[in-house]
Image: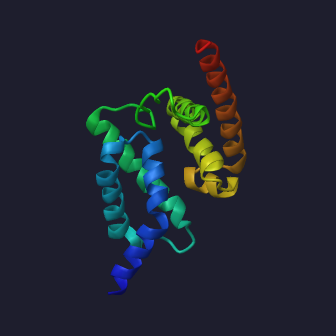
């Protein structure tokens, strides 16, 4: 009974984090439910192996990244755009909403094009709002390297967004 309560608590607490991590790692929207279940099966099987000194978020992130990599290998997906194609808005649609959807689509394309190391740090810092010390533990690098990857990711992202902006004019 306690194991079931603990499992429910882990899913409740980390379910959205796993979902977002898988999505940013290239798992297609249509497969997220199945792949996230695969992640939680592994988590529950290995929960006893988690060291008390380790961050559970870092451990779950690592499992999620490995499962997503296996998914991409199985389906020969290198990188899928993070959001499904957004349908064109009707002429009567709010232009602010159209701008937000366009910006979201561009950000998704930029994130998908970052290499894995930079993407992980960028997503965890800018979208998950984690501190760099936790990010460094999650991705397994020194804190200074994390900051370096973040700066490189931001520079690359800005360059890509600038190119996209010029191309759309």
**Quadrant placement of the C terminus:** top right
Using the image as rendered, state which of residue 14 and residue 147 is in the foreground: 14
Q: Is residue 81 above or below residue 165?
A: below
- Specify the color scheme: rainbow
Picture quadrant of residue 69: top left
Q: Is residue 153 visible?
A: yes
Whether residue 135 sits left or right of residue 13 in the image: it is right
Q: Position of residue 91 (x, y in %)?
A: 50, 26
Q: Position of residue 32 (x, y in %)?
A: 35, 49
Q: Is residue 70 visible?
A: no
**Quadrant placement of the N terminus:** bottom left
Q: Position of residue 40 (x, y in %)?
A: 35, 63
Whether residue 10 sits left or right of residue 162 in the image: it is left
Using the image as rendered, state which of residue 55 and residue 81 is in the foreground: 81
Q: Is residue 29 above or below residue 153?
A: below
- The residue shown at (38%, 81%) is 5
Q: Position of residue 28 (x, y in %)?
A: 35, 40
User: Which residue sits furthest front?
Assistant: 92
Whether residue 56 sits left or right of residue 28 in the image: it is right
Q: Is residue 160 above or below residue 8?
A: above
Whether residue 39 sits left or right of residue 92 in the image: it is left
- The residue shown at (47%, 64%) is 14
Q: How many marks?
A: 0
């Amino acid at each position: 009974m306690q194991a079931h309560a603990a499992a429910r608590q882990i899913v409740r607490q980390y379910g959205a984090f796993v979902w977002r991590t898988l999505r940013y790692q290239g798992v297609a929207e249509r497969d997220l439910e199945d792949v996230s279940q695969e992640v939680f099966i592994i988590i529950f099987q290995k929960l006893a192996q988690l060291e008390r000194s380790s961050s559970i978020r870092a451990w779950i992130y690592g499992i999620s990244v490995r499962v997503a990599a296996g998914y991409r290998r199985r389906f020969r997906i290198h990188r899928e755009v993070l959001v499904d194609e957004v349908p064109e808005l009707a002429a009567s649609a709010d232009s602010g909403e159209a701008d937000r959807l366009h910006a979201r689509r561009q950000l998704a394309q930029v994130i998908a094009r970052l290499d894995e190391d930079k993407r992980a740090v960028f997503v965890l810092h800018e979208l998950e709002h984690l501190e760099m010390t936790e990010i460094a533990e999650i991705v397994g690098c020194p804190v200074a390297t994390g900051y370096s990857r973040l700066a490189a990711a931001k520079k690359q992202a800005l360059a890509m967004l600038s190119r996209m902006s010029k191309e759309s004019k």
